[in-house]
Image (tube, rainbow, N blue to C red):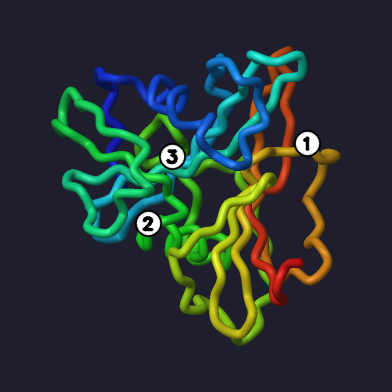
Amino acid sequence: MAVIHHTVLKPTKLELLTSWLPSRPWYCGNTGEPILAKAGGFRLDDPQGEVGIEFIVVTDTSGPHPTTYLVPLAYRGAPLDGLEHALVGTMEHGVLGRRWAYDGCHDPVLVAQLLALAEGRVQAQDQDTSDVPDREVTRAYTGEDFTSPDFTTTATDDQEGTGLPAQHGMTLRLHRVLRPMPDGPPPLPQGAAGHVAGTWRTPDGTRAQGLFAVLHTAPQG
């Protein structure tokens, strides 16, 4: 299990995201600087113990209507060749030293573990406490024969999220702009083989839930 270090980060994760979010096609805030607050999230374990995997949920309150975003981050102890375009930034960790934070949709370790979560082979972990499962993160999977397809990390962003193509016409779709759904187990969207859903806190302190990622069996148009 990954160990959560309660230490100082310079800059902080929210400071990194404040600079990075406005550059994304799916960012729908105003032209000014985002005003971000942590709203939720979870972690996954890297089986090799090398990469930190965190799915951060942040809410931007800079505009007239708060918008909540999902940002998967992969933390590495050294830069990863070929992923310069996916670098969110670097920070100094009080225990681990310099860390390179990448947009996790481009990191093969994070993508593999997200698929494993959707398929039920791993369990989401609490964002802030070591060795504690996060029961608020749910998943569903049809169990057909295409378990663990060969996904690429050639992620494509649009105004709603990020898509990762795979063999056999499949797509892993991350919902970057989160939309609240009614309480209860989220149903599988039409044409989907699986999904991951989670919860977050709204600015008024209530709990919301929605889809984080969906595994589609057909190309998305």
Instruction: Name the residue tied to disc 3.
Output: 132
Q: Nearer the viewer, mark 1 or mark 3?
A: 1
Image coordinates for residue 33, horizontal then vertical, percent: 53, 16
Q: CA distance from mark 1 to mark 3?
A: 25 Å
Measured as percent of width and height from the top left, residue 178 is found at 69, 38
Alpha carbons under labels 2 and 3: distance apart? 24 Å
> Alpha-carbon neighbours of circle 1 within 10 Å: few (<14), some, or many (≥20)?
some
Assess whether mark 3 and mark 2 are in contact (beta carbons under 8 angstroms). no
Using the rendered view, name the quadrant where residue 37 is placed: top right
Please provide percent x and percent y for residue 30. Answer: 66, 21
Instruction: Name the image quarter holding the C terminus.
Output: bottom right
Q: Which mark is residue 33?
A: none
Badge 1 is on which residue? Answer: 180
Q: Marks 2 and 1: CB-CB under 8 Å?
A: no
Q: Which badge, 1 or 3, is on the more N-terminal residue?
A: 3
Q: Is label 2 in a helix, a strand or a loop?
A: loop
Q: In which image quadrant can residue 93 be found?
A: top left
Q: Residue at x 64, y 50 (%)?
A: 158
- Mark linked to residue 107: 2
Mark toward the start of the polypeptide (2 vs 3): 2
Q: Quadrant of residue 13?
A: top left
Mark 3 is on which residue type?
A: Val
Q: CA distance from mark 2 to mark 1?
A: 27 Å
Tag 2: amino acid: Asp
Viewer-closest of 134 and 98: 98
> Quick check: 76 left or right of 171?
left
User: Mark 2 Cα within 10 Å, few/some/many (few <14, many 20+)?
Assistant: many
The location of residue 208, given as percent across then percent down, is: 74, 31
Secondary structure category for the residue under label 1: loop
